[in-house]
Image (cartoon, coloured by chain):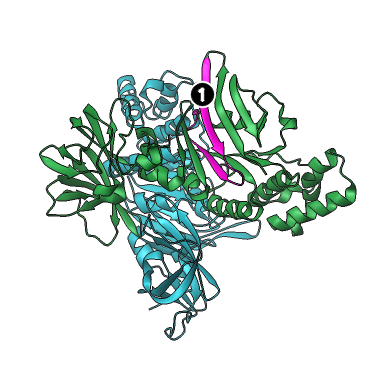
Chain colours: A green, B cyan
Amino acid sequence: MARIDIRNVRKDFGTFTAVKSSSFTIEDGEFFMLLGPSGCGKTTTLRMIAGLELPTSGEIYIDGEEVSQKPASQRDIAFVFQMFALYPHMNVRKNISYPLVSQGLPRAQVRQKVDEVAGILGIRDILDRPIGGLSGGDRQRVALGRAIVRNPKCFLMDEPLGALDAEFREHMAEELRALHDRMGATTIYVTHDQLEAMQMGDKIVVMNHGVVEQFGVPQEIYDWPATMFVADFIGSPPMNFLRFEGMVGRGTAQIMLGEVPVEIPELIGAAHGNLVLGVRPEHVHLNDSAPYRGQVVAAEYLGTTQIVTLDTPNGVLKARISASEPVKSGERTGIDFDPRTLTVFEAEKGRALISHANEGVLGRG
Amino acid sequence: MAEVSLRNIWKSFAGQVALADLSLTVPDGAFVVLLGPTGAGKTTTLRMVSGLDKPDHGDVLIGGRPVNALTPAERNVAMVFQQYSLYPHLTVRENLAFPLKSPLLRTPAAEIERKVGEIAEMLRISHKLGNKATQLSGGEMQRVSIGRALVRNPDVFLMDEPLSSLDAKLRADLRIELKKIQANSGATLLYVTHDQIEAMTMATHVGVLDGGRMIQFGPPREVYENPVSIRAASRLGQPRINVLPADLFGAAPDGAVTIGLRPEQIAQGEGEGSLVTRVEHLGDQTRLHLSFKEHDLITVTEAHTELKPGDIVPIKPKKPFYFDASGTRID
């Protein structure tokens, strides 16, 4: 198993830069998510780790060995694609055996390994079935089996669940994570689905326009986004942005939304002009006696919780509150924020100002 | 717009029963979402209304008029599928205008232009009107497909997982958009999905299908808070409702075989101890995987819980659901 180091990796396609100088580290045994919208460079990054693309500059270390200019075949990794590329004319056993047979492994050993992998994946009973009649889930398991059987240093997965329907995707996500926990293999997983990333990942890299926006533990990225892009991309509904003008600096612990003072975590960074107060929906509370006011535009029922959309003088605000709290469209209400959870952004640069609350996460870079 | 009624519909394919005595009324102006596992009969129901399939028995009525004998074209319904079906050689503008250019409608050119512009604006594809359909991303193509249904004035819109091929962000945006369009236009909409969030947030009524039967029909809140059976209860709620032996937490009502607990029906900090086996941080909430007397259950706790695998949390049911041997709710 392997630790992977990405150092200042860049990839140009002609005049287009797909990945701009990116660096991050994947620790041995981690389930690591590359997250971002389409075109952000996440798949290109994965393909460079795999050796399917060679970086224009920068280094990639797998277990300390620099491999950035080596072909895929010399890297000892296994790639699982979104569209499971199985050999349709072979049965399950032959599909899984294929990588071993082509390595010239003795037949008895191949048999034993395939059996072991089939056991891990729970597909022993379909080993002699043709690929044609398998369900989507079983095909996915066979594709995984073919990747696992070689015992590679690292698994690379490019939206392996993207083609599945919602319900089944959730089931396979749990299965994949459990499989990872049993095998402990370093896994790099590309997805555009933030919930999938939060749910499965030990660490997440969030990319946008070829740039690494933030890198870290899911809950920390969620709580303390480095940029407005991350704040908006992660979370459903995403972080609210209340726009205001003002000046803040070291020691500022309160801002003004119009006439209303709002407590924030004490700032270290400074900025003035167009600023943004970032607040997650679950940290917005409706409280009739609060001085900051808004009007309820809509309430979306979600079972345990509901999402209430409010119009405020500083923009649209969504609150996630208990479904049992009565809310009526059109009514005006007071709004409270949990002061410990707030982030102030500079609007133009889109970057979070460092505060005593987020410096532990953002100070590390 | 019009009410849609299905009355005692039976349909089999090669001996396999797809719909078994299915009845459903989509009230005029309602947004009805059909939920159910693969093979429950959701898409077949939609095809009955569209006329792409005909029932073996039973009647389909649109606006009170029996339409069994009518072809899809004669039914005045608009369909949107998961796989966008655009004319690749036409531009976005031409694709959107196509349904209006039908000789039957005789829509004036200026009117077509106005409607296409309006729809394109609403779906945020105005800047792509001159592009060929093949030059669009998947999300854009799907928005054009939805737009093409919207430019007409059909009696009913039929949509089969129209958002499932889009990425999460776009899906969330279009969810709100579709709901708004439906609410403002008063359109009658029958919508099929796997995604319960789509059902919960958009539907005026949810129809839960299982094995070709309608097992519950009502507003999302009613179906969530007052499910008639385990199957209905399992369709809504994330994480899914926990179904456990009825007497696991003590005495159960007569006839109860299982107890159903949604996360909000599990009180934490009181009752008997359960073992934390996994803690899943999802940002706004944290999921606790618990082991209680050899049974696994999943519940939700506050996002920044200090709990770790190996910790013990006391739990106790709070206004639980009970179900009998057939999975039917007992009060």
**Is residue A257 in view from this perspective?**
yes
In reply to whether residue A38 is colored magenta, the answer given is: yes
Q: Which residue is drawn at 74% across and 31% down?
A: A74
Mark 1 burial class by Cα count in 10 Å: few <14, some 14-19, many 20+: some
* Residue placed furthest toward the left: A259
Q: Is residue B172 left or right of residue A347?
A: right
Quadrant in the picture for residue B200:
bottom left
Quadrant including the N terminus of chain A: top right
Q: In this view, does B219 lie to the left or right of A157?
A: left
Secondary structure beneath label 1: strand
Position in image of residue A328 (x %, y %): 19, 54
Q: Which chain letter matches label 1? A: A
- Closer to us: B162 or A188: A188
- Closer to us: B13 or B164: B164
Q: Is residue A54 above or below residue A232?
A: above
The residue indicated by pointer 1 is A21
Q: What range of the chain is rendered magenta?
A: A16-40
Position in image of residue B101 (x %, y %): 41, 25
* Residue placed furthest toward the top: A15
Q: Tag 1: residue type?
A: Ser
- Closer to us: A282 or B185: A282
Position in image of residue A354 (x %, y %): 31, 36
